[in-house]
């Protein structure tokens, strides 16, 4: 298994509790602000040496709240994400116009159907090479998907899985199993995270 950063500790420092925006979604000041042209957003991320991912959420989602109040208050998780990813938040039921990688412009809710987003939160990851997705729909271009809420260890492991390129070599389940075995060998568990 490729070496991965040890990002978390039991005594993690905590960031401020996130606010809820006018649309009912949680606000993170480091999420991507864009014109919602996904090909352009991916190109900017690649130019900045980061990977691009889309986070789907919806108003009133208890697992979205959990994501923000548990995972995204851990400063080491936020630092890792900010350093390695551009994360765009979309609303499962939103009406903003978004241009998919294939050039089709749809409302957020129509794009969610097109990409078969069934749960929130869902994070969809894309390859770091903008040419790999040019002209293809997002659903056909994604390299990994996190459907639903993952606890901190599993959450950050998925981001490491994509960042390290391991999605090209093995399944996330195999990657995670190897990481869990490494933790066990060190006498730790996911509870230590």
Image (cartoon, helix red, strand yellow):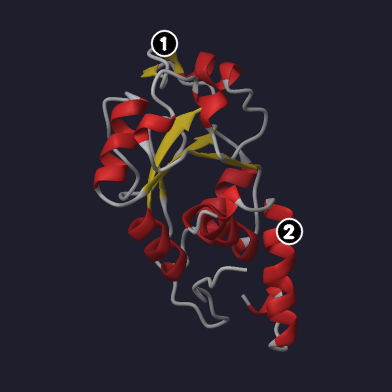
Residue 102 placed where, x, y %? 42, 16
- 95 versus 92 height, above or below: above
The quarter of the picture where the N terminus appears is bottom right
The quarter of the picture where the C terminus appears is bottom right
Residue in view at x 46 percent, y 34 percent = 24
Looking at the image, tell me whether mark 1 or mark 2 is earlier in sequence order: 1
Residue in view at x 70 percent, y 84 percent = 188
Q: Residue furthest bottom?
A: 187
Residue in view at x 56 percent, y 48 percent = 65
Q: Is residue 48 left or right of residue 27?
A: left
In the picture, the disc for residue 136 is none
Secondary structure under badge 2?
helix
Secondary structure under badge 1?
loop
Give the residue number, with chain letter if any, for mark 1.
104
Q: Is residue 72 left or right of residue 193?
A: left
Residue 29 placed where, x, y %? 31, 49
Give the residue number, with chain letter if any, for mark 2.
174
Residue 173 placed where, x, y %? 73, 55
Q: Residue furthest front?
A: 169
- 3 versus 175 height, above or below: below
> Which of the two residues, 36 or 69, is positioned nearer the viewer here?
36
> Which of the two residues, 84 or 90, is positioned nearer the viewer here?
84
**Dots 1, 2 in contact, CB < 8 A:** no
**Would residue 173 be visible to someone looking at this image?**
yes
- 4 versus 172 height, above or below: below
> Which of the two residues, 180 or 134, is positioned nearer the viewer here?
134
């Amino acid at each position: 298994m490729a070496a991965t950063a040890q990002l978390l500790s039991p005594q993690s420092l905590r960031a401020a509790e996130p606010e809820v925006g006018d649309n009912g979604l949680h606000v993170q000041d480091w999420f991507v602000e864009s014109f919602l042209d996904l090909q352009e957003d991916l190109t900017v991320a690649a130019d900045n040496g980061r990977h691009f991912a889309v986070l789907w959420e919806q108003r009133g989602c208890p697992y979205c709240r959990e994501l923000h109040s548990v995972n995204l208050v851990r400063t080491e998780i936020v630092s890792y994400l900010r350093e390695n990813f551009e994360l765009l938040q979309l609303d499962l039921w939103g009406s903003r116009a978004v241009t998919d990688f294939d050039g089709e412009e749809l409302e957020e809710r129509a794009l969610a159907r097109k990409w078969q987003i069934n749960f929130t939160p869902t994070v969809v990851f894309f390859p770091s090479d903008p040419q790999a997705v040019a002209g293809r729909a997002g659903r056909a271009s994604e390299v990994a998907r996190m459907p639903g809420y993952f606890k901190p260890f599993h959450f950050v492991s998925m981001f490491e899985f994509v960042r390290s390129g391991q999605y090209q070599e093995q399944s996330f389940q195999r990657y995670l199993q190897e990481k869990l075995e490494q933790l066990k060998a060190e006498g730790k568990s996911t509870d230590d995270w």
